[in-house]
Amino acid sequence: MTNRTRLHISDEAIQHANETAKRIREQYGAGKRYIVESYGCQMNAHDSERLRGMLEIMGYAPTDNKNEADFIIFNTCCVREHAEKRVFGNVGALKKLKDEKPSLIVGVCGCMMQQKAVSDRLYKRFPFVDLIFGTNELHEFPQMFEKVLMGERIKRVQDLEGEIPEGLPASRTSTLSTNVVVMYGCDNFCSYCIVPYVRGRERSREISDIIDEVKQLAKQGYKEITLLGQNVNSYKSADGHDFADILYALNDCEGIRRIRFMTSHPKDLSEKLIDAMTNLDHVCNHIHLPVQSGSDRILKLMNRKYTSAHYMHLVDELRKRVKDIEITTDIIVGFPTETDEDFEATLDIVKRAEFSAAFTFKYSPRTGTAAAKMDGQIAEAVKKQRLKILNECCAEATKKSNEKYIGTIGEVFVEGMDARDIPLGYGRLGNFKTVYFPTDRDLTGQFVNVKITGIKNSSLFGELI
Ligand code: 5AD
Ligand code: SF4
């Protein structure tokens, strides 16, 4: 077999990984347990599923109990600073366990390790960590792990060459709904963001590989998929397909009832994508469209390449054309030089856009990014105060967005049961709203109609009909 495109990791390399994993199973795997502790975004969560997939081929079984684990690995994130502090704390806390059980293997991988200064620091500070690797070495995990099992200590963080791993196994955490990566990396260089430095340049999978993966998942019984990429709107395959083409191709995939996607960048949201959302019955009426700020001056400093007016134009178009669409977003407060007036503009856009939900963050300087070097860094106390006000404003928007559903009937894909007081089923509407409803029967995995009667915290509450 040969490389299908220049971007693919060779089929031979993937085969080598799978063969090594099987060899480990025969020699070392019996009765072994693992923990993969995952931080950060959906993309990282999917990398963790790939790690689990390889570990399970090696014969390792999952456990939640650190005391019985033979291998513990942290798949790290470095998008915001507190994630980094937590990882150093959690790795350090394993020293005692490793002293008591020297055969325990400890690994750290992911975005944070891709920053060479940080992985060097971790390697020196925690000599009991056996294995460190970055975001570009996932497909070499079995080979590295085999060497560690033979007594080597390994740190391998390569420069990002931007390859695409096709054909690695994955052990997926849900059996109903799952993620499919359509593209890797990001070329946008928003001035606050570390992702382009740790995930490398944008590279898109071939549309045929994506379709094959989704068909395979449909056969396994998955009914909902989420297409993942840092900026799915800039998906471009080698043969010229764009992101909307993937949606058109997948809409007819038998068994897949709901197609979701994230994240969309406002600067690239095309008419064609809005058309696809309007026309395709299996594409969900939800979009995650990070606004980041409502101030044009801050948006410019963030290098976001759109204005608040353009953002609101998109919101209006989406609401006009996609029935019952809900919009969720990401917002940063306390970006360098942000004034009270800039912050007011952010509160204003939250009110106007009526976000269904917002993920809100205090700006966190990341070494190596443009914003970290800017004058006018904002005091922590100011960031904290702004975040509190923003969260209250977002909660008000969520409440308003929820109230419109009272008295309506919606289709819920049931994700599970919550049995704290009375038995409640819960799941989501197509537009991503979570709905709780009383039921004695476990309806997990089914689509049911629910009449919305009220609000439960930031979710909806209703009755089965
Ligand atoms: N500080 C705070 N928030 C950040 N995000 C990305 N980088 C930073 C940073 N340095 C937020 C953005 C992005 C989300 C995934 O994380 O809002 O959309
Ligand atoms: Fe980071 Fe901007 Fe790329 Fe999103 S689009 S991953 S915020 S650089």
Image (tube, rainbow, N blue to C red):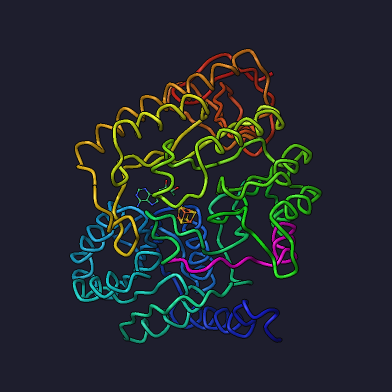
Quadrant holding the N terminus: bottom right
Magenta span has 212?
yes
* Residue occupying image coordinates x 42% and y 28%: 394
Residue 70 visible in the snapshot:
no
Characterize the magenta stretch by its predominant secondary structure: helix
User: Where 187 falls versus 224 (above or below)?
Assistant: below
* Residue 331 on image: x %, y %: 41, 40
Residue 325 image offset from top left, x and y in percent:
64, 31
Count of numbered circles in the view: 0
Q: Is residue 328 visible?
A: yes
- The residue at 68%/35% (across/down) is 446
Is 158 magenta? The answer is no
- Report which quarter residue 204 is drawn in: bottom right
185 is higher (above) or lower (below) than 277? below
Magenta-highlighted residues: 198-215
Q: State which quarter of the image contains the C terminus.
A: top right
Question: x, y percentage for residue 447?
Answer: 69, 33
Residue 21 image point, x, y percent? 52, 78
Residue 360, quarter of the rendered image: top left
Against 206, is 263 above or below? above
In the rendered image, the vertical position of residue 116 relative to residue 65, given as above or below: below
Using residue 398 as the reference point, say whether residue 267 is left or right of it. right
Image side of residue 35 versus residue 242, left or right: left
